Amino acid sequence: MNNLNGRNKRSHTKRIINKRLLGYSVAAGAVLAVAPPAGARTIITDPPDITIDDSNDSQYVDVNNDGIDDFEFSRNFFATVFIQNNININYNQILKYDTQQGPSYAYRFTCSEIVPDERTNSSTFAELQRWGDYPSGYPTGPFVGESGYIGVYFYIPVGSGDVEAGWHYGWIEFEGDKDGKWGKIKRWAYETDAERAISTPQCAPIPTLNQWGMMVLMGLILLEGGRRLKRRKDQEV
Ligand SMILES: [Ca+2]
Ligand SMILES: [Ca+2]
């Protein structure tokens, strides 16, 4: 009786180990399977940071670097830092607006977030932050003392190379100061495929298996495979 219990326990433990090994090999497969879809590229432009300050000069962002400015950043006489589309060109929009603070404010995307490929909650003008002296006495807005990403979509009338004509999604990284007075445009990105949602940069690098870890893992999988083969042969005999 004791013997039987012991054997049952051993085979139970073995089942758990088998399950875990299966889990590991699925995880290893998932790591190997990660690859961007063919043809789609995210193009990131990272110039020296562009400061928006109290000079009231507008600064422009050309998201796809085709010589046509797509968005304008400025600080108005109410000391509000805002973004708007380049109204001379087309109907580019800020996507999406902050649903808690209202359509006057841009939503602040953080890392590893998808800028959705849908054009709801969008706006041609959005505030990023307001200086403390106006209107409420303290700095307000989603970018006060925060870094983040403004989701945008814009139109490329004529494609070139692997960049398709049509509506494109992108983001602009912006950092606001703690007083809501000034900010910095840090970098921007867009997808080469039209109508493709874009992700903001990853929050932290993905932990990668080093070569030794990978070899040990492969060894474990092979070892278990060998054991299973042997067991099947034993059963056949
Ligand atoms: Ca452009
Ligand atoms: Ca930069």
Image (spheres, helix red, strand yellow):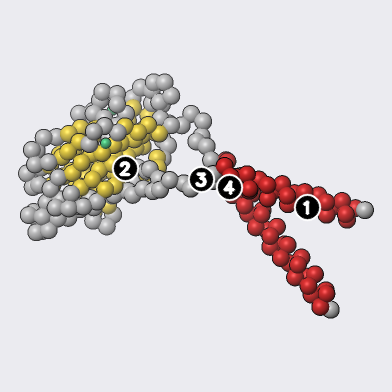
Q: Residue 183 in the image: state x and y as whole percent.
A: 18, 44
Q: Is residue 154 left or right of residue 229?
A: left
Viewer-side label of 1, 2: 1
Q: Of marks 3 and 2, which one's residue comes earlier in the chain?
A: 2
Q: Residue 191 in the image: state x and y as whole percent.
A: 39, 33
Distance CA(mark 3)–CA(mark 2): 29 Å
Closest to the observer: 208 or 32? Answer: 208
The answer as to whether callout 3 falls within 8 Å of ligand 2 is: no
Q: Which mark is residue 208?
A: 3
Circle 1 sits on which residue?
A: 227
Viewer-side label of 4, 2: 4
Q: Which mark is residue 151?
A: 2
List the single residue furthest toward the right.
Answer: 237
Q: Of marks 4 and 2, which one's residue comes earlier in the chain?
A: 2
Viewer-side label of 1, 4: 4
Q: Is residue 131 left or right of residue 101?
A: left
Q: Residue 47 in the image: state x and y as whole percent.
A: 26, 32
Distance CA(mark 4)–CA(mark 2): 38 Å
Query: In percent of the image, x 28 and y 37: which residue is there?
Result: 187
Q: Of marks 3 and 1, which one's residue comes earlier in the chain?
A: 3
The amino acid at mark 4 is Gly
The amino acid at mark 3 is Thr
Q: Neighbour class for label 3 at 10 Å: few (<14), some, many (≥20)?
A: few
Closest to the observer: 181 or 39? Answer: 181
25 relative to 43, above or below: below
Circle 4 sits on which residue?
A: 213
Distance CA(mark 1)–CA(mark 2): 53 Å
Q: Of marks 3 and 4, which one's residue comes earlier in the chain?
A: 3
Provide the secondary structure element on which disc 2 rests: strand
Q: Neighbour class for label 1 at 10 Å: few (<14), some, many (≥20)?
A: few
Q: Residue 217 in the image: state x and y as whole percent.
A: 63, 48
